[in-house]
Image (tube, rainbow, N blue to C red):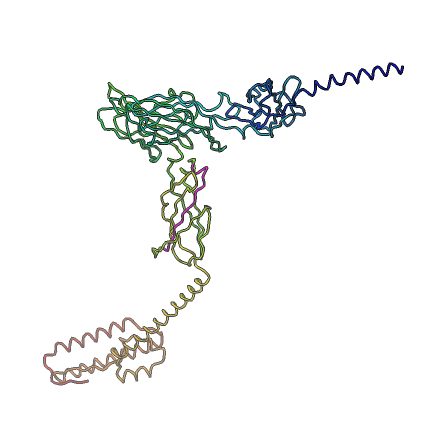
Amino acid sequence: MLALLGATTLVLVAGAPWVLPAAAGVEKLKSPQNVEVYIMDDNFILKWNRSNESVGNVTFSAEYQMPEMDNWIKLPGCQYITSTKCNFSSLKPNVYEKIKLRIRAEKGNNTSSWYEVDSFVPFLKAQVGPPEVHLEAEDKAIIINISPPGTKNSAMWDQEDFKYSLVIWKNSSSIEERAETVHARDKIYKLSPETIYCLKVKAELYLQMKVGVYSPVHCISTTVENKLLPPENIEISAKNHSYVLKWDYAYINVTFQVQRLHAYLKRDSENYSDKWESIPNCEDIKITQCVIPQKKSSKEIYFLRVRASDGNNTSLWSEEKKLDTEQQTIMLPPVINIKSSSDSMRIYVSDSEESEKRPVSQDYPPIYEIVFWKNTSNAERKMLEENADFTVPNLQPLTVYCVKARAHLMNGKWNKSSVFSEIVCEKTKPGHTSKVRLIAGICTALFAVAVVICAVKGLWRCINYVFFPSVKPSHVAEYFSEQPLKNLLLSTSEEQTERCFIIENTNMISAVEETNQIDEDNKKYNSQTSQDSGNYSNDDENNGSKTSEELLQQEIIWPEINSVYC
């Protein structure tokens, strides 16, 4: 047994020198260096550098791992690669998820250690590649067709989000360059006929802040100038409930045709030449303008174009004009309502009924410019308000203030203003001090009126006393003193007064005395009757009047005046 164990040991010892030299003769492989991932559009490229340039027949293999994986998986397109790069686009990973890669060198059964690449998100690492460009020439324009970067159904980009810009120049001079922003299918205008132009295009994603690389340079020559020129200076404006498209044209005896295209069709790289549509009432017209009706509560963007025809020849289409219904919408003036107090006014500003139906008023709240002033003054005060309901303080009571307002849209997209609204005037209400002053003023006025009336009465009495005295004979005063107080109500026609007569002869004196006697008897009788009944007799008054008239007649008919008796 011991002999057998010793023999085995001998064999192992003797065999050791044969194995070790073989292992020592193989050079250990080193891991790849400077490993990087390049992603452009939908192309995924892994690049690296060799560590052992002297070692031949070395291949490279890579593996990947996603966050939810525990094991490493062979990376397709990157197994046993003899060069220093591989394309793993066939993997088609989720471009918004992290991915981790590793690579090693291999030669037979000999392998290097793994070189791990830091995890990355493909979308963030990707670069926008150059677009494909195809050109068509006209006499004064170039039609450009752009295919977006990436494959047709790109997993990396939303191809409708691309914006394109180009640089164009005459082939004879690279100094006169001009840059333009274009759509996927567009026209470059204002070129010269029969001239070679060169251009290059790049794509951009504004929201993701990714700028692509330029395409290769493409050159093309414009054609001979067309006989019938296209309309020029296309302008559009809003008027009431319509849009008015106007243009200039040098020739007469031609007709015009207007077409429009929905703007969203230009974002598609497909050919939209058959998507243009004619506008009603804008076909075969002889004037250089066209009225396009507005669509209420509609936000749309169109491109408009015009061409001319003389029956035998037709011009090329004019330069396209963009119509944005929001930008062309006219802002109508607001409506003002006022509620006043003694020292302030509350102002309510609202949009008109037509403005409320328009997209601008619905999506973009305006800022209101308020101008107000005293009705008796031209000094204006201005204020800007974002709210449609606000108060103007520190006003004077019982004062008329006038207000007008207009609306502004001032933001990054809009810069529009309406005209001023109609002027609205309102009188502030009286305050507590004004009420007290009003009552005091009324009382003072009433007192002044009473004083004036009393003064006028007193003055009138003085005037009557001075200029119109009432003279009464002494025997009349004695008569009144003898009568009872109630006889003061007797008529003034009954008062006894002295009469003087011119008597021609003595025979007439006796007649007068008899008449006086009769009058005295009548007066006594009347006086007695008044004391009994308290009223005068109308018959007696008439008799007295008749007697007085007879006496006056006697005075007139006496021809000679010899004596005067009283």
Drawn side of residue 203 relative to residue 467, left or right? right
Location of the C terminus (image quadrant): bottom left
Give residue 355's position: percent from left, percent from top. 41, 38
Can you tell which quarter of the image residue 140 is in?
Answer: top left
**Whole-percent x, y for residue 115 in the image:** 62, 27
Image: 52 above or below 510: above
State the quadrant of the N terminus.
top right
* Residue at point 76%, 18% (across, down): 16
In the image, residue 6 lies at what x, y percent?
A: 85, 16
Nearer to us in this view, 500 or 527: 500
- Give me the residue at 30% from left, 76% from top: 461
In magenta stretch: residue 372 = yes
Q: Quadrant of residue 407?
A: top left
Residue in the foreground of this view, choosing between 145 and 75: 75
Look at the image and tell me whether residue 280 can be seen. Answer: no
The image position of residue 456, as x and y in percent, is 32, 73
Give 524 or 357, whichever is nearer the viewer.
Answer: 357
Q: Residue furthest right?
A: 1
Q: Nearer the viewer, residue 222 or 430?
A: 222
Query: In this picture, which residue range is highlighted in magenta?
Result: 360-374
Q: Is residue 566 above or below residue 268?
A: below
Left or right: where 211 falls relative to 257: right
